[in-house]
């Protein structure tokens, strides 16, 4: 499994793009979130909208969904040799987020007698329900209220024969979700958002270190972090956390 970080920054990043990823599962490309910077980050990583087979949306903040409508529209309104050759976008979403996401997309997609379903097909998962993508198993866990109170959100676990990764999404109150219960002996990486400044909706680096047992610190991959990360190098050097870098490639 290869993982391409399109961006690793927070909502207001100026240099790191939004925290979106492409997971390459054999010949299948799964896009993790579609923030406003997607139109630039995806091309800089040498991918295009039509390369994407599935999209997973974690929640409805603009840095995770702000570029989704454009991607859907460009995939649908493509022409090959002058012929309309639409590609519907397959969206994987937690059941708690389905209706709010459809409502959001209706604003831009429902016109000229089109419906959201003309452009998209939805794969709706409940907590722990497994969706198979080839040899991989993709499942969601509910993080509603653990990032922003009252906001539906989710993280995911991706498993294959040799291991699995846990991706928290945006989260502040890790113990409320019991992230540790998603981790097992086959977990090779935990992708955790990390804030280096006081933040009401994202876990601080100290909160992360306090929550996870020291035996797991070496499996932590920090994401969704501040642009001015250089100011915190001394702090980072005292931990075993690996910071994910945009446009690199991670293999597991």
Image (tube, helix red, strand yellow):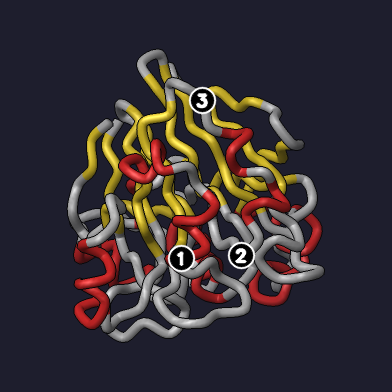
Task: Kindly identify the residue that appears in the image at 77 percent across and 64 percent down.
Answer: 100
| Residue carrying label 2 | 172
Q: In this view, does 22 lie to the left or right of 133?
A: left
| The quadrant where residue 132 appears | top right
* Residue at disc 1, secondary structure: helix
Classify 200 as above or below 24: below
Residue 20: x and y, percent?
40, 60
Quarter occupied by the N terminus = top left
Task: Kindly identify the residue that appears in the image at 59 percent across and 48 percent down.
Answer: 155
Classify 11 as above or below 42: below
Residue 11: x and y, percent?
47, 79
The disc, 3 or 2, on the residue closer to the chain's N-terminal end is 2
Mark 1 → mark 3, Cα distance in angstroms: 23 Å
Label 1 or label 3, whichever lies nearer to me, is 1
Task: Tally the numbered discs.
Answer: 3
| Residue carrying label 3 | 184
Residues under numbered marks 3 and 2 in contact, where contact means CB atoms less than 8 Å apart: no
Q: Is residue 69 left or right of residue 40?
A: right
Task: Kindly identify the residue that appears in the image at 37 percent across and 38 percent down.
Answer: 189
| Residue carrying label 1 | 206
The disc, 1 or 2, on the residue closer to the chain's N-terminal end is 2
The disc, 1 or 3, on the residue closer to the chain's N-terminal end is 3
Q: In this view, does 228 lie to the left or right of 224?
A: left
Quarter occupied by the C terminus = top left
């Amino acid at each position: 499994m290869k993982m391409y970080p399109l961006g690793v920054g927070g909502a207001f990043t100026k240099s790191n793009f939004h925290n979106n990823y492409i997971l390459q599962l054999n010949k299948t490309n799964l896009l993790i979130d579609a923030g406003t910077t997607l139109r630039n980050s995806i091309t800089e990583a040498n991918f295009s909208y039509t390369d994407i087979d599935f999209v997973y949306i974690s929640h409805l903040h603009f840095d995770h969904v702000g570029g989704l409508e454009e991607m859907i529209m460009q995939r649908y309104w493509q022409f090959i040799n002058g012929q309309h050759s639409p590609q519907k976008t397959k969206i994987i979403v937690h059941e708690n987020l389905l209706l709010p996401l459809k409502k959001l997309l209706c604003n831009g997609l429902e016109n000229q007698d089109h419906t959201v379903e003309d452009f998209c097909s939805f794969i709706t998962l409940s907590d722990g329900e497994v969706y198979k993508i080839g040899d991989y198993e993709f499942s969601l866990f509910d993080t509603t209220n653990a990032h922003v109170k009252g906001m539906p959100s989710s993280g995911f676990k991706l498993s294959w024969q040799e291991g699995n990764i846990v991706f928290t999404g945006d989260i502040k109150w890790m113990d409320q979700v019991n992230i540790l219960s998603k981790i097992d002996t086959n977990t090779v990486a935990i992708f955790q958002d990390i804030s280096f400044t006081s933040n009401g909706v994202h876990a601080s680096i100290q909160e992360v270190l306090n929550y996870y047992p020291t035996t797991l610190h070496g499996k932590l991959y920090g994401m969704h972090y501040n642009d001015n990360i250089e100011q915190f190098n001394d702090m980072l050097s005292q931990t075993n956390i690996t910071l994910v870098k945009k446009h690199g490639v991670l293999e597991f």
